[in-house]
Amino acid sequence: MITPLPAIDVPSPARTVIQLLEDAGFEAWCVGGFVRDAVMGRPAHDVDLASNASWQQLKALCDSAGIPVREIGVKHGTLTVLLEGEALEVTTYRIDGAYSDGRHPDQVSAARNIEEDLKRRDFTINAMAYHPERGLLDPFGGQRDIEAGVIRTVGNPRERFKEDALRILRACRFVSQLGFQMDEATFQAALSQKSLLGGVAVERMRDEMERFLLGAHVHDALLGTVDILAFPFPELVAMKGCQQHTPYHIYDVLEHTAWAVQNIAADPILRWTMLFHDMGKPGAKFEGPDGISHFYGHAKISVTLAAAVMERLGFSNHRQAQILALVKRHDDVIEPQRRPVRRALSRLEGNPELFRKLCTVKKADASAQAPQCAPRMQLANQLVQVMEAVLAEGEAFSLKSLAANGRDAMDAGIPQGPAVGEALSAALEAVIEGALPNQREELLAFLQNWAIGR
Ligand code: ATP
Ligand code: MG
């Protein structure tokens, strides 16, 4: 029994374009993520349209109606129509060759009808079409699979993954976003053919993996698909079953990681950080004679592994730097007092935003440990409060926030060159440690003494 379709509200720009095409004797349907999310009753998704009109035919109709268009995707049969502040992609019915940019196949040929166009789509839940009057077109049982919570390829999964291996990661991504499970044949094909991902462009993999990490069901998805993700992320394999015999932990490293990822805000920097934060534990682990597991130095190994993964996946330098700083510091002990907080801030390049993120990381980490670690979450909250006080009172924790600068150092008699930086760093150190107030007069005296002492 399939539940009656919820009322699907097609936004006005899409209705206008459908009307425009159909008044001219063509046919058009809503397709893809919009239909899937509408059938699921999830929040509205951008509408994509599919039509039997060529892009040139649609462009001619838009031109005569005075509707602006963009021709960026026309190589793949996609025309972007600009209406009511929205950019609507309209694609001619097509059959695909291989995909290499994640959105558009390398070669396309026209499909005869909507059914053929739906057939080339990846999963049954993504292969439905909807029309405001004609209703739902669902030739592969997408609605049934939505009700059952199943990700199933359209057609033979082995063949569909061979055509485009990115679909393997897309399947994992939909598991994480929707809380669904792969159907058995789809899962087995993804598992046994995961090495095909070796032929997929790294940025496509990175984008899908990021969507995976941002998913609302990422904990279950990570545990459920780890053996597939092992191809792009072999580092995960050692985490699976890596037991933590300590009073602080109740999960193995993989499940702890899965909870830590799930329990942090869906922000890319934070989610990648949690994925990486304990990756070094299997390498660092040893067991004492008392049977207690130790992981000394694991954060450093996590940094090495995370750097290698991000390099492989082509992360920007800026992103890498932030994530690595958080991974490196995730386990630092910071007392909730001004001096330790100033020190921690200076270790994070004096970046309060990064310190705030570090506290979030610590909180998520603690939330994924044994229940007795709950006070660590309080501690992370306290750290943020202390930092706010440090900021409010203008305390120094970086050269930028120091009440003296390079000019002052040279005026105090320090020769231009590296000595200036050394002197200012020494002054900053003294201020952070509380040995010197962050006041210009006092700093100038310190710098003059430094110049004399050299
Ligand atoms: P979302 O935009 O929420 O991530 P989506 O389903 O819209 O999800 P897109 O990547 O935007 O995903 O793709 C739009 C549609 O194009 C999909 O619903 C699917 O029908 C089809 N599609 C996308 N990528 C592939 C692929 N690699 N193989 C086959 N069909 C694909
Ligand atoms: Mg989309």
Image: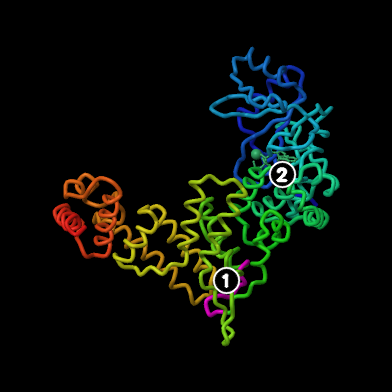
**Residue 108, how many percent across, how many down?**
78, 29
**Residue 281, how many percent across, how many down?**
58, 69
Please name the amino acid that badge 1 sits on: Ala
* Circle 2 crowding by C-alpha within 10 Å: few under 14, some 14–19, many from 20: some
Query: On screen, 360 above or below 72?
Result: below
Mark carried by residue 254: none
Q: Which residue is located at x 30 percent, y 49 percent?
A: 418
Q: Earlier in the sequence, mark 2 or mark 1?
A: 2
The image quarter in which residue 28 lies: top right
Q: Which residues are magenta?
A: 246-254
Please name the amino acid that badge 2 sits on: Val
Q: Quadrant of the C terminus?
A: bottom left
Secondary structure, mark 1, is helix
Specify the principal SS of the magenta part.
loop
Q: Which residue is located at x 64 percent, y 22 percent?
A: 71
Q: Is residue 127 magenta?
A: no
Question: Which residue has dot 2 on it?
Answer: 200
Q: Is residue 252 magenta?
A: yes
| Quadrant position of ligand 1 | top right
